[in-house]
Image: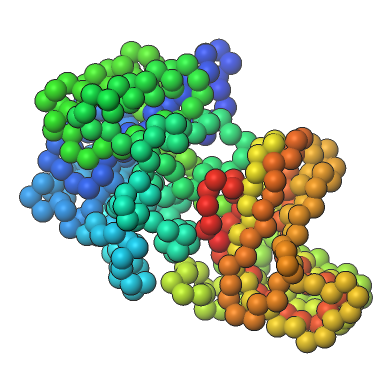
Amino acid sequence: MAGTAPAQAATGPDPAQPARGVVCFTWDDAYSSWPQISQMAADRGQRHTFCVTPNLMLDRLSNADVVNMHSAGHEIACHSLGHPNMTQLSPAQRLTEYTASRSFLENLIGEPVTTWTYPYGSAYSPPGRTPTTDQELYLRYDRLLDTSGEPQTAVYPRFSTGPSPFLIKRFGWAQYPMQHAKVLQLIRQAANSPIIAVIYAHDAAPMIDNGYLAEALDLAQTLGVQCVQAKEAFPACPCNLMDPSFEDPNLYQWNLQKNGGNESAVAESVILAPDVNIPGARALHLSNPGPTGYVTASQTVRIEDNRAYSLSFRDKVSIKTSGNGAKIYAKVVVRGPYFEVLKEVYSTPFLTNTGWAHNEVQVPATVGASFVEVFFAIESLIGQAWFDHVHFGPTVDGKFG
């Protein structure tokens, strides 16, 4: 389809070339200068991400402009419908911002829009994102673009064996000399090291007039630094787990086990209304009919060595009677390259909440780690448990499950 380019940032380094990074230029709102940015980037073989707020287009940007930018190879991302501070809206109002803007853009370009860009992100006061809005956007989009006032927080490793980050900080660029100098520094850093530098700006007209935009794009071209879309730099991976909301009725991505003679134990995907404003229609249901044995659902994923991770999820339980060692829990088993067990971390305390609640397992950085097994389980008790909206990723990602 027009505008779709092959992912380049997720592959390994070319041994014939020096290790190099990429730059991800993103543009927020909607401005009449954008078609010129699009052409300047396309002339240099560069791809940007344009984060469009439909209600701001008006006389600044036409539908045809958006289609043409997409056809030129650029990503079209969603920047809400009307650019409100999301934390100051009701859940119903936020849902409209999440979905109506996406539908408009998808109908326009004829392609899924997978990137959400926060209006008034973390760098603003009051901030425009919270763990609540992150959780509402999780599984609706493949990545969230946030804001940052410091360039070092907007730099990510390019060649990573672990999950792609879901929440992505971006350094703000404008016509001011100090900010511009930092942007040029990020481009030079990407020329010499395998990083992803993420930059955002708004109206480029002042930077076109003073030459800053051309200088930055020319520098990237001269140094051989690729400029890529956000979705290329950060492939679809809001959670390193497959089927993290148990929407597959057959649970093919999950390993289901029962032990201790409990042949009537159950591990299944059931239709269950999600908690407030949470996407999805199904949940994992575990049921253990006796006070012995266990029933589990698990999945194995690759992680990076010596990096801290978090497992977050929503759950509720119903406990009848229990035996020795009775518990309902989530567990992460950290394993080495030969699948040897290095560490086991349980949800603490064990799960007892009878209504939907958010829970977490913090997995400390472990030297030699290569894989983890994520478990949800009932052990040695008569009871049931429901799990939904699971996220496993680097601790710095935040709370999404």
Percent position of residue 62, x then y? 13, 48
Q: Quadrant of residue 304?
A: top right
- Residue at position x 72%, y 74% in the image: 286
Which residue extends farthest left? 59
By what rule are the colours in the image chosen?
rainbow
Out of 170 and 50, give the one closest to the viewer. 170
Q: Quadrant of the C terminus?
A: bottom right
Question: Measuring 46% from the left and 24% from the top, which residue is drawn there?
Answer: 21
Q: Residue furthest bottom?
A: 320
List x then y, in percent, for residue 24: 37, 33
Q: Is residue 383 left or right of residue 250?
A: right
Residue drawn 63% across the image and 52% down it: 310
For the question of whether residue 277 can be seen, the reply is yes
- Give left or right: position of 360 versus 76: right
| Above or below, 48 relative to 352 | above
Q: Which percent across, then down, holds residue 272? A: 56, 78
Q: Is residue 1 visible?
A: no
Number of marks drawn: 0
Classify residue 214 as left or right of residue 281. left
Locate the N terminus and report the quarter of the image it occupies.
top left
Q: Is residue 20 above or below residue 296?
A: above
- In x, y percent, where is residue 180? 27, 25
Q: Residue at x 91, y 75 (%)?
A: 324
